[in-house]
Image (cartoon, rainbow, N blue to C red):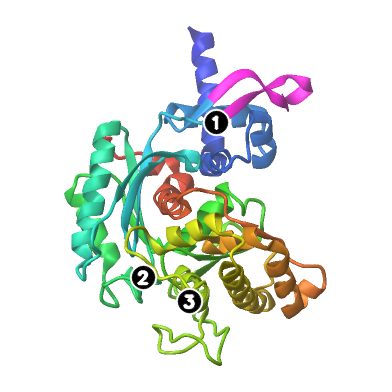
Amino acid sequence: MNGKATTTRATRTRLDRGRGALGPALELVHTGRAPTRAVLTAELGVTRATAGAVAAELEALGLIRVDARPGAGGAGAQGRPSHRLTVDEHGPVALAAQVHADGFRAALVGLGGRIVATAPGCVEVTADPAQVLRAVVDAGARLLHDSGRRCVGAGLAVPSAVAEPEGTALNPLHLAWPPGAPVRAVFADLVRAAGIEGPAFTGNDVNLAALAEHRHGAGRGAQHLLCVATGHRGVGGALVLDGRLHTGSAGLALEVGHLTVNPEGGRPCHCGSRGCLDVETDPLAFLTAAGRAPGPEVSLLQQSRDLLRDEPRDAAVRAAVEELIDRLGLGLAGLVNLLNPDRIILGGLHRELLAADPERLRAVVADRSLWGRSGGVPILGCTLPHNSLAGAAELAWQPVLDDPLTALAHPAG
């Protein structure tokens, strides 16, 4: 009995010493950078015993799984096989949602960026944000009820710059919402009214896509990651520096859609200018350049993807691809000169354009940018499905990653 009590006290002492390492340890497992306890020990710079106590506490919280069987290729101290660490597939989830011009999608997302369940919703995006967000939260609440999972919080991605600290959608140009709509406050109120646990967050959809790609997708390992993407309408950009979004002093950094790339003869932009990236390289611009009339059946993004897939050799389609690549490359080159990223990732239609003619895009960027001439910057396509949803979930997971014990202290419903 005394021996057992001594062992327990020693374990608690190791855990107390490593309590500050719980958050960093969880983030390492969450992002796949600590697949074994040996790697966790090295990354945290703690003793093997402390790393074991930290891993055991995270497992007790229902966040990770510790497997004592030998990890593939992993070895601990003195050649002993190291315990494998994975996120708990049956653990808590975050409620994530994305609103775009054609409706919304809600999802449950676990640690590791795993999308557990989704619920698409095609509703008219009216001028009243509360009407759409109520449908979003109702769909998310149903997903949570059906799953029986604990919820750590909720995150919402919107196609607009989100001004800080107010959480207002400053310029939802492709929605019917009025500028300055208080989307974060509305979303948080609806989440609380639905009885959903945890805090509620809101962010720009491309910012959140970049965050998810940096942690789980094509941006992993980059120190200065630039993301540019076009979804259903318009163009957005984001910058991730050392694992954190760079959003500027008021959340409005990297509004790349309003870079001028075609000043003479360019299309009129919603911002009042002409020839902006926003209207020169989005799906509507592609369909127009290819001589196709947009239809109402599916989203403009899907229509563009279908056209690239079904008619890649059509002369008008090829000309449209080249035109948009040249405009996109010009915009990317300017951003490379300003930001000096070590990797660029492209999402939405831009990813499809890269796949259609990667050499042309890379050549334009290299020819127009100083760093491109000195060796080039890698340009890759985004790899995560629904990356804005995954990024919205990252907002909700962040308090848990920062301090698991405090974030999970509130009782489960």
Secondary structure predominantly adopted by residues drawn in magenta: strand
Viewer-closest of 219 and 8: 219
x 32%, y 63%: residue:
296
Number of numbered discs? 3
x, y percent for residue 343: 67, 62
Name the residue tied to disc 1.
Answer: 86
Of pointers 3 and 2, the one earlier in the residue sequence: 2
Name the residue tied to disc 2.
Answer: 165
Specify start and end residues of the magenta stretch as a single range.
Answer: 66-85
Q: Is residue 68 magenta?
A: yes
Residue extending farthest to the front is: 314
Q: CA distance from mark 2 to mark 1?
A: 35 Å
Per the image, label 3 sits on a secondary structure element best described as helix
Of pointers 2 and 1, the one earlier in the residue sequence: 1
Q: Is residue 113 left or right of residue 74?
A: left
x 39%, y 68%: residue:
294
Residue extending farthest to the bottom is: 264
x 20%, y 44%: residue:
195
Q: Is residue 409 left or right of residue 206?
A: left
Q: CA distance from mark 1 to mark 3?
A: 40 Å
When the figure is inspected, residue 313 is found, relative to residue 105, above or below; the finding is below
Per the image, label 2 sits on a secondary structure element best described as loop
Name the residue tied to disc 3.
Answer: 278
